[in-house]
Image (cartoon, rainbow, N blue to C red):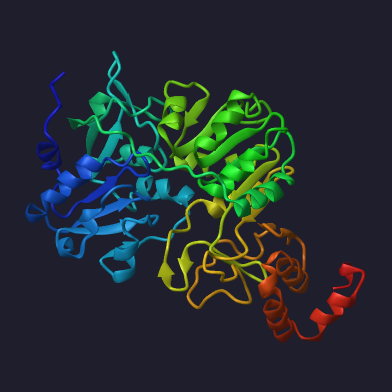
Amino acid sequence: MKNKFVSAQEATSLIQSNSRVIIQGGAGTPMTLAQAMTERAEYLENVEIVHLHTEGPANYALPEYLNSFHTNAFFIGGNIRKYVNEGSATYIPIFLSDIPKLFSSGKMPIDTALIHVSPPDERGYCSLGVSIDIIKPALEVTKIVIAQVNPNMPRTYGDAIIHESMIDAMVNVEDPVYEMKINPPTEQEAQIGKNVASLIPDGATLQMGIGGIPNAVLGYMNNHKDLGIHTEMFSDGIIELVEKGIINGEKKNINRGKITSGFAMGTRKLYDFMDNNPMVEMMNIGYVNDTANIRKNDNVMAINSAIEVDITGQICADSIGTRMYSGVGGQMDFMRGAALSNGGKAITALPANTNKGISKIVPTLKEGAGVVTTRAHAQYVITEFGIAELHGKSLVQRAHALINVAHPEHRESLERAARERFGRIFGVYASASNTELV
């Protein structure tokens, strides 16, 4: 086979003007290729860049490159948030589960894919490693594939495997795979985690994100049994529970015995855990986030976060008012999938206040805020002050439940807003001993 290894500059010279380029995201972001592409800006015009959230510099999104590159993100990471809100980049609101269909249907053709893989094995197979999500479906339709090849990328299985014959140009790198700092949960996060864990039965299948609260939840799982993982992403928090045999996937109805996920982000310890581990099954997001697949497992616990929740249960998770912050992501895929699962629960876990002391339980969402999870889909909202069960409850019952888990310093103002909104019935409910009267 022809030697495909070239310099990053030569590899990215395959990118043409008036084309669409997808960049692998998360910890798998091919930073060397992204920067080499950016350095060729003077030779390119009208190149559309699409991706989920990426790590590292996103210099292609700088305003001075707008004639060369236009970023159209499916999810907003910290490296492009400023550019989206200032107007030099844009955001596509879409469920993660729907993105592969954009590619396969031809609605969003892909011309070039920039990826990050492990070196070819003796049979020529590379692995996409830590990030499969939307990149594998894109590889099935793209015309050109450019890969940075890195011995530090863990070799994972499932949908992660790609043969070198499918790659047009390869660039050797030996950079560390992006690592995320894992901080111990705060006291507040620990209490939220304890409250969430109290709802999770033995044999449950977990979906959770990355950060202090998910890690805190996992920290309270040491007395559980036979837990499974089917999640769009995971981090270091699962490792100890796997080593103790608590996470074993034995009760899962599909992908039994496997940790099923679309991408992972954490420390080198996590990547070493994933490397050549047959228990880890990295799949494309069209499979992982398909509600029909999620619901096949019993007792699916979908644990997600929010920016703010109004007193009727509307959940904003993508913006602060009109200012875009992240994206729709897979929250609704899993909230609905869990709700349809036998014994499943859709859980939103968040601190009662922001770091500045502003309540995250609010009378109404900020003007322009996005409703990622509708009030009809919200089941449980959990803060450090308790659990508000909303499923099947009236607007007034929801308001009372949510006010009870708000920070005590904000409850009086929230009650006042609820009385103004709902009138006399709010007070009637408060004095009634039988909540079913409302």
Q: How many marks?
A: 0
**Residue 79 visible at all:** yes
Residue drawn at point x = 28 percent, y = 37 percent: 115
Q: Is residue 242 above or below residue 207?
A: above
Q: Is residue 427 above or below residue 227?
A: below
The residue closer to the viewer here, 265 or 370, is: 265
The residue closer to the viewer here, 141 or 76, is: 76
**Residue 339 visible at all:** no
Residue 98 placement (x, y as % from top left)? 46, 50
Residue drawn at point x = 68 percent, y = 33 percent: 222
- The quadrant of the image that shows the N terminus is top left
Residue found at the very far top of the displayed protein = 122
- The quadrant of the image that shows the C terminus is bottom right
Residue 240 placement (x, y as % from top left)? 58, 29
Q: Is residue 114 above or below residue 315?
A: above
Residue 66 placement (x, y as % from top left)? 18, 63
Position of 92 with respect to 35 (left or right) is right
